[in-house]
Amino acid sequence: MKKGDVKVCILLIEGTNCEEETSHVFEELGASPERVHLNQLVRDVPPELKRSLEDYHVLVFPGGFSSGDYVRAGAIWAARLKSRLLQDLRTFASEGKAVVGICNGFQVLVELGFLPGIGGISEVPQAALATNDSAHYECRPTLLKFENRGLSQPLSRFHKDQTMLAPSAHTEGKFTFPQGDERRMLTALDRADQILFRYVDVEGEYAGYPWNPNGSIHNIAGICNPRGNVIGLMPHPERSFYRYLHPDWTRGGDGPDGDGRLFFESILDYVMENF
Amino acid sequence: MLKATVEVRLKRGVADPEGDNTLKALNLLGFSRVAAVRFIKVFEVDLEEEDEGKAEEMLETMCRKLLANPVIHEYSIHLLH
Amino acid sequence: MGEIYRREETPFPLYTIDLLEVSDDELLEASRELGLALNLEEMKRIQDYFRRAGRWPTDVELQSLGQAWSEHCCYKSSKYFLREFIFGIESPQVLLKGDAGVVEFDEDHALALRIESHNHPSAVEPYGGAATGIGGILRDVLCMGAKPVALVDPLHFGRLDYAHEKLPKGVKHPLYLFQGVVAGIRDYGNRVGVPTVAGSIYFDDGYVSNIIVNVGCVGIARKDRILRNAVQGPHDVFILAGGRTGRDGIHGVTFASLELTDEMWEEWRAGAVQLGDPIMKEPLMHACLEAADRGLLDGMKDLGGGGLSCVVGEMALAGGYGAEVQLDRVPLKEEELSPWEIWVSESQERMMLAVSQDRVDEVLEIFELFDVPATPIGRVIEERVSRVFYRGHRVLEMDLEFYTRGPEYCRPFISYRDMEEPKEVVPSKPEDYGKVILDLLSSPNIASKELVIRQYDHEVRASTVVKPMQGILGKECHGDATVLKPLTTSWRGLAIATASTPQYARLHPFRGGASAVDEVCRNLVSVGARPLALSDCLNFGNPEKPDRLGCFRDAVRGLGYVASTLELPIPSGNVSFYNETPASPVPPTPVVLGTGIVPDIRRCITSDLKAEGSNIYLLGRTKAEMGGSEYYGMMGGEGGEVPDVDAARLKASVEGLLRAMESGLVRSCHDLSHGGLAVALAEMCMGGDMGAEVRLDSGSLRPDIFLFAESNTRWLLEVVRGGEGRVERTLQGLPLTRIGEVVGSDLAVRIGGSSLVLALEEMREAWSSALPRLVIG
């Protein structure tokens, strides 16, 4: 498939607020992104606005505060998806297409039971993105080390231990497993190669606050499902797509590309090779 | 019509940054004798349902489907008369 | 209610009030009873009008006038002076003045900017007050057809460790107010997805009883999509979009036009403060912009102070027409609202659109997709009157000219020159300058605000290319200005900074006003931006008191002096009076939002030191100007000369510095403000995690004065080694001194026979731990 034919659905509802920049990076890379309101998928709207999920190759849940994150981050959006679109979503994922949740999108995928999805898509969440240890919003540069050993095909352009700068910006991002079950779940996650990114400091070491901005267990910043095609992460690679979006770019650096660019390139390569 | 409240709280042992930080703020505001604060969310729900059994069942489902995440939360349901 | 009120025989509550034959006392009594906050002169004007009309006014009409003629809505005490000093600053770059000022960004795009106060609501309910402040300023920019791209928030509180037992009755502790305001801005701003990129936090006990919460917004639009806050013709329909209307926020503007007393706090808490709903605002913005982008709108205006009662008349009058409204079409939150309540309610998240009849359906369709209610509620008429109907009854009919124009005053004022100047008390020379620097770094007005800055999403929209915290990862320090790259198709940058100068304005209002413009220009130039336009928010006491009004006038004169010399337009702004309690007024607080243009963001400069071996230069003249300085504040100094501005030299410095930066030889730049030279140096070192060796000649000044004076129009530059000659030539004629170089990991200063050495870690610890200690404990 040619790059221009890769159709990317950037899904949004009220409160989603990173759709523009997320759409922009796909456009910049030559793909065909479209911002789609959930209503266009599930409601009676004029025919020219009606959209169907099956027409896309990549589905992105962008960042923001869907429905205000009022009950719990991502919970309301997940509930709305469950009631209206669950089967379409399952089909989409089962075809191996790429599903990407960034920040609020990661929270949605966890609430939906798609992530971590150990033993399949779960009825109730298997993990939680709990309130940050600081108890407030944290908008700061974070460094992620790529930990995947090869499961996640859409991110295969990353090599193991590569670091990526991607800013974090969230209140509820502390990746949490049920108490008492942490070790077992972590081991399962690791064995199945579902860990994608972990927070590190400038030396590349796993570190505490502020490098781990929320207190996530095992410094987990991003994970994938057992098949590797559903991807979720708290930090925002679209916010480091260009070099000049890095917080320290005025100190000098190489070329115009930012660290986050590879994340999106890799996903597009995967789609072009497989569809 | 039945009224109910649903309390959603963090399970014992799960870190409660909102509670902890509120405690610190209260101490700073001069309430030196506050020893602990826990953050609890309460939803007040009006139900178009007369049957208490059915109401409880409905509220249970609500909690499982939306109001709580069982990984970190526990909840309690109180029907009001 | 008294006997002048008559309940009309309508199926809903409607009163007429007999003002025609009543005494002056009764007029004032009616103003008070109805919560109009109008004075006798104004009530008599109303009396005259209705005598001529030959009928009693309705409660709807009187309430409308109370709103329209409030200080908040018609600037009746300030307009005279603003016209005298500010409105006349001409610039070809100003495209439109409305709820926000519109200036040119590039050939095809324009910026909309505005800053305003939300002081009274935030004092009563800090979380909701600050949040709705953000909501309101977003609408001001949105209604020009511009997409909001940045928020700013200059804030002023009492000191966070203020003794509880000293708090006046009914006043909340500064720490509580601070936390509530920051959380309100955070939760609203972050949710609507507009980055909060600049601001300031100033602590002074003058704000214990009255906090100052200012919020500003900048938006961008295609020039051909800019909207006026006006109707275009009799084919226009008024569409009310967004949230439902409720009893919340009634009389917000009249409260904002009075001093707060104990009873009013209670009353207000009950009604006038709201929480706001960012998740209604977010799709509302999308829908409005979509409709504007498709060219479907004739005009737009937000519902703020005075609600429908102000917006309908103002839009109609601005277009040269009148309006007819069916109040029963307004979607309500609760039943049983009286017509006057619907008409003046200030419920949040509402916009008024003027849409040509033939485009109404298309507009409504857009709003439906975004799940945002939108309802046609009235139409434009040729006659210049406002007419309002409720359930078939006419409840209001007034000439728009009379209703909307409002009164204007030139009240008596006393200039500061006629007041007694405080005597200067010079603190004794300290033993250890290093310790003074550390103490200054940890003083709340200078210490790191990272704790607050990082609670705001300053990067959403992925266009913040120079961030508010600048420097090495994990070691960042405050920058002077933030730069956005608002268009994906252009390298052109938008620089944003704020300045607030109560510390000077309280001693010398004129110089305070002038310093605010100087500071905001310094900030913008520091990142490589040419100042483009300003918006001002002027927070003062009761204008009916001549000394307060004199302060205001002098501050405006100072702003005008510098802005006009630099040909910097101020196409929008806000005045907030009555920031006082019976005990005292707030320090006069002029606040400025500055925007600037960076031709290519790849040439931006930040404040952190970049390279070992670079030269450090001081640009600008240091004088014994200690009045209002942090140093005096900390060391017990009093009075003193307040930093003056030589606007011509500021202009020459701005031009020179921008030229020097174009050469690419300036690696970092930082302006000198709170704490003077010593603090600026320390900040540059911390951000770059690099030391510096500096030798200073204080000339005739005492060394501590030289180190800590806050004289205006000064910057520190880091110049690439080997670039000295070119930079010195470019800046010829300006006071430029090479003071040292970037080296090692300590800040080492030699001055007048003494020397000091501070390690980076020592400075960082002092600077970064102060605010968390006060806030988190």
Image (cartoon, coloured by chain):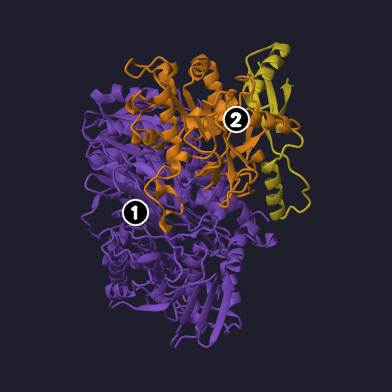
C525 up-or-down from C345: above or below: below
Q: Residue C256's x, y, as percent?
A: 47, 50
C163 up-or-down from C63: above or below: below
Q: Nearer the viewer, residue C765 or C297?
A: C765
Q: Amino acid at mark 2?
A: Gln
Q: Colour of chain C?
A: purple
Q: Nearer the viewer, residue C510 or A71?
A: A71
SS class, disc 1: helix
> Position of C74 compared to A185: left or right?
left
C627 up-or-down from C668: above or below: below
Q: What residue did someone put label 1 on?
A: C602
Q: Residue C13's x, y, as percent?
A: 47, 29
The quadrant in which residue A131 appears is: top right
Q: Residue C400's x, y, as percent?
A: 28, 40
C90 up-or-down from C352: above or below: below
Q: Chain for mark 2? A: A
The quadrant in which residue A146 appears is: top right
Q: Colour of chain A?
A: orange
Mark 2 neighbour density, 10 Å: few (under 14) some (14–19) many (20 or more): many
Residue appearing at x 53%, y 76% in the figure: C748
Q: Chain for mark 1? A: C
Q: What residue did someone put label 2 on?
A: A194
> Position of C207 compared to A13: left or right?
right
Q: Which tag is nearer the camera, tag 2 or tag 1?
A: 2
Query: Marks 2 and 1: CB-CB under 8 Å?
Result: no
Q: Amino acid at mark 1?
A: Arg
Residue appearing at x 70%, y 61% in the figure: C165
Mark 1 neighbour density, 10 Å: few (under 14) some (14–19) many (20 or more): some
Among the chains pictured, the one given yellow colouring is B
Q: Nearer the viewer, residue A139 or B77?
A: A139
